[in-house]
Amino acid sequence: MYIHETKIKVRYAETDQMGIVHHSNYYIWFELARTEFFEAIALPYDLIERDGIMFPLVESSCIYKESARYAENLIIKAWIEEIKGMKFTFLYQVIREEDKRVLAIGKTIHVPVDKNMKLINLKKKNPRLLETIKAVISAK
Amino acid sequence: MYIHETKIKVRYAETDQMGIVHHSNYYIWFELARTEFFEAIALPYDLIERDGIMFPLVESSCIYKESARYAENLIIKAWIEEIKGMKFTFLYQVIREEDKRVLAIGKTIHVPVDKNMKLINLKKKNPRLLETIKAVISAK
Amino acid sequence: MYIHETKIKVRYAETDQMGIVHHSNYYIWFELARTEFFEAIALPYDLIERDGIMFPLVESSCIYKESARYAENLIIKAWIEEIKGMKFTFLYQVIREEDKRVLAIGKTIHVPVDKNMKLINLKKKNPRLLETIKAVISAK
Amino acid sequence: MYIHETKIKVRYAETDQMGIVHHSNYYIWFELARTEFFEAIALPYDLIERDGIMFPLVESSCIYKESARYAENLIIKAWIEEIKGMKFTFLYQVIREEDKRVLAIGKTIHVPVDKNMKLINLKKKNPRLLETIKAVISAK
């Protein structure tokens, strides 16, 4: 299974007045990691979109264990846990680089749609895309 | 059980290039609804913070059913589903005002902490706050 | 000259670890005020966009006098200061409702473009839109 | 004069439904560049804050020449243009890496304040910090 690692540094604007990263930003980091994941397997996300295929979320969740703070270096691990029917399930870990502690664990579920936000069947519409992704996640 | 309704209008900056609201913004709307919920039960959120008590999230999730779009009027319903041990569980519904369709369903789980982000036992530290909240959620 | 007033309440996510509103959010409030300005003069912003006309910014600026803080009620005043050639200049004031102090003053300059982001000449392409806007700003 | 270069990649969440980067994000990029600038001259921004000194903005502005788009690689150049009295003026350029075109030009003006947001006189309170910064900007 391919696990992609994205490195980020916490931005000042991502903090809130509790002095920690506002929880909504973890979902933006997951998206960054997802984008890089697709690029790493040679499927640039903007190319997929130019093909008319988008992967909106149908579900997202995050468990926060420890707070991330301003200027910390983080590693976002991302991988595809499952492809079942139309649903693509991504899992994520947010790791503080300094001490390797897992600060948060996330999940997002996506379905492929066309420009009109109608569900599309990748098997018919773009089997090559589906096969490429499946090949990546089954590879050790 | 007290259900609070918050009205918002989708901001332009909340859209993304898919032409829909970026999924991370739903969590910001949940927070708005939570703030208003506390105010509605006479517990202004900033007063709680001035007391040294904060309610960071330990978990958040959202199920997206239909996309919200720019300039739409939305109703965010919020209520406390459960208080169990230290955990406060909020549930949310995002409803499009025009046709009353439920666009998304959310959940956030919170724990009370002090200024140093240490867990605090509300029963001992601030029983009045806990009782007020419990009274609200048990009221019909 | 028509001055539109938009009311907002500072969101928690808009604060940063300085304990004040992050400066970038003022530009999002200006946009809110602009959207409501267009609606108030019966030009819903999304209708303009459906016409294929968009008003991207070519310039923005803000002078911060006092900090806005979480949960404060603010009034954003917005008006069109000038239409000169292709350029539309909006001015803004951010006013704290409680004491009527002006916390910030902003300016944004916009030009009309089509779906391909090419400058369009409103006088030729949509004179009615231009006249409506001009009528509003010259009215006392 | 020391010019710092920060590299970023446009995030999906930074786009809006015009299909371009929302204008408010440029200010967040300027902040990133400023943070890295301070680190590059051995003044980590969070250390300055731990000293009780913060540099809130009193003014910000941006001229947008061309739109930045999703997944583009950008270089943010940042330098201190002037220190005059209490005011620190930063200038910025947003450059698209691929063709080296300058997409935007920005400016932010900052003043040093203490934890209570009161102006502080760096010459008295922290002359070493002021001298270090001045030495950097006068160096070729």
Image (cartoon, coloured by chain):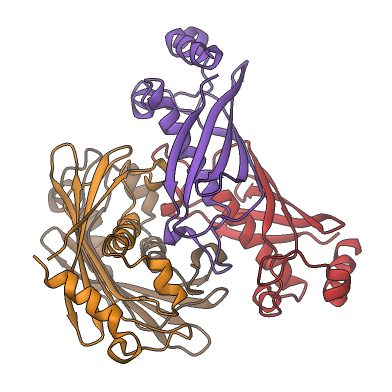
Chain colours: A orange, B brown, C red, D purple
Residue lying at 53% horizontally and 87% vertically, measured from the top left: B98
Q: Is residue D92 visible?
A: yes
Quadrant location of residue C35? bottom right
Question: In the figure, A54 relative to A97: above or below?
Answer: below
Residue lying at 46% horizontally and 8% vertically, measured from the top left: D127
Residue lying at 90% horizontally and 64% vertically, measured from the top left: C139
Which x, y percent locates residue A9?
32, 42
Asked whether, in this view, residue C125 is left or right of residue C54, the answer is right
Instruction: Judge by depth and name the residue closer to the eye, C40 or C90.
Output: C90
Instruction: Judge by depth and name the residue closer to the eye, A34 or C134.
Output: A34
Which x, y percent locates residue C2?
82, 62
The quarter of the image holding the C terminus of chain A is: bottom left
Question: In the figure, A5 relative to D85: above or below?
Answer: below
Question: In the figure, B26 relative to D87: above or below?
Answer: below
Instruction: Judge by depth and name the residue closer to the eye, C66 or D124.
Output: D124
Which x, y percent locates residue A85?
21, 88
Question: In the figure, A91 relative to D90: above or below?
Answer: below
Asked whether, in this view, residue C82 is left or right of residue B110, the answer is right
Quadrant location of residue C105? top right
Asked whether, in this view, residue C131 is left or right of residue B19, the answer is right
Quadrant location of residue C85? bottom right
The quarter of the image holding the N terminus of chain A is: bottom left
Give the mark count: 0
Asked whether, in this view, residue C88 is left or right of residue B105, the answer is right
Q: Is residue B5 visible?
A: no
Residue lying at 55% horizontally and 58% vertically, measured from the top left: D22
Which x, y percent locates residue A80?
19, 69
